[in-house]
Amino acid sequence: MKPRTLVVGDIHGGLKALKQVMERAAVSKDDTLVFLGDYVDGWSESAQVIQFLIELNETRNCVFVKGNHDVWCEEWLREKEWDKVWGFHGGFLTVKSYESINDAERLEHLNFFERMKMYHIDDNNRLFIHAGFTSMHGPMQEFHPSNFNWDRTLWEMALTMDKHIRRDSKLFPKRLLIFDEIYIGHTPTLNYDTTVPMNGCNVWNIDTGAAFWGSLSILDADTKQFWQSDPLPQLYPNEKGRNR
C-alpha cells in the first residue's frame, strides 16, 4: 500500500480513542502521522496520551504540532503553577492524570512539548497548523505567534468564502493562496452541528469534538478518506470530559 499522510485531530486525553482510530485506519510504519495538537485536557488519560506519543515516535514517522492546551500544559510542567483559565478548560483533569507520573517522566514530557512544531509544511505545499495565522504572507511572517494556537479567523473566512470567487480574482483572500491545502484543528465541528471533518475552500478542519461528545478523527490528506473512533463518552462512560 502507498505510504499515506494521515492527519490526526485534537485528542484531548482520549487515549482509548486514539488507539481505536489508529487501528481502524490500519496505520502502518510507512505512513506519516501529522498530529494537529491539543493532546491533553478533556478525558482522564492526558499524561498517558503524551507517553504513548513519545513511544509511538520511536517506531513511526510522526509530526507533532502544538495546540493551545499543550502550551498551557507545557507551562505547568515547567513552572509547577497553572493558569486558572486552563484549569477551567480541562487543566485540572490533566494535572490529576500526572499523579502517577514520576519526575523523570515529567521532564521527558516537558522536553516533548518543547520540541513540538508550531506548524508544519510538507513537500506538497500543505500547511498543518493547530488553529491558524493572520499574516497575508503566511505563518513564516506572523506578527503574533500565539495565533498559531488560537486564531479562528482563518477557518471562519474559509468556511464563509463565496464559492464563485475564483483563485485568480483580487477578491480571493491572500492567506488562502499561499498553500495548496491547510489542515487545522482547534474549532470543533460540533459547533456547526456536524460530527465529521469539514472543508471550507482549501482548509480542512479535523477537530470533530473528541473533547466533548464527538469522536476522534484521522484523515488521509491525499484521498480525504477518514476514520473515526467511537464517540468519547462511550469510551469513557464514567467521565464527562469537558462536557458540563
Image (cartoon, grey):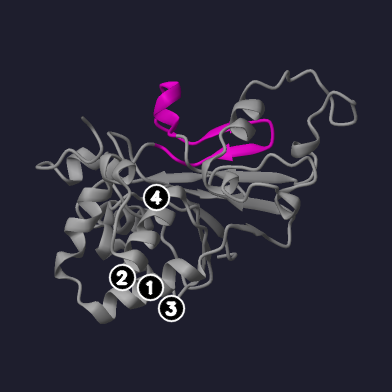
Q: Amino acid at mark 1?
A: Ile
Quarter that holds the C terminus: top left
Foreground of the two, 130 or 103? 103
| Mark 3, other Cα within 10 Å: few <14 / some 14–19 / many ≥20 | few
- Residue 145 is left or right of residue 168, and the answer is left
Callout 2–callout 1 Cβ contact below 8 Å: yes
Q: Is residue 242 above or below residue 97?
A: above
Residue under label 2, please give it.
51
Foreground of the two, 220 or 66? 66
Q: Quadrant of residue 104?
A: bottom left
User: Residue 49: image x %, image y %?
Assistant: 30, 62
The residue located at (79%, 18%) in the rendering is: 164
Residue furthest out toward the left: 238
The residue located at (14%, 69%) in the rendering is: 100
Separation (CA) of disc 1 from disc 3 = 10 Å
Magenta span covers which residues?
Answer: 188-208
Residue under label 3, please give it.
59
Separation (CA) of disc 2 from disc 1 = 5 Å
Q: Amino acid at mark 2?
A: Gln
Q: Is residue 106 above or below residue 90?
A: below
Tell me if residue 190 is in the magenta stretch.
yes
Foreground of the two, 118 or 155? 118
Give the mark nearest the N terminus, 4 or 3. 3
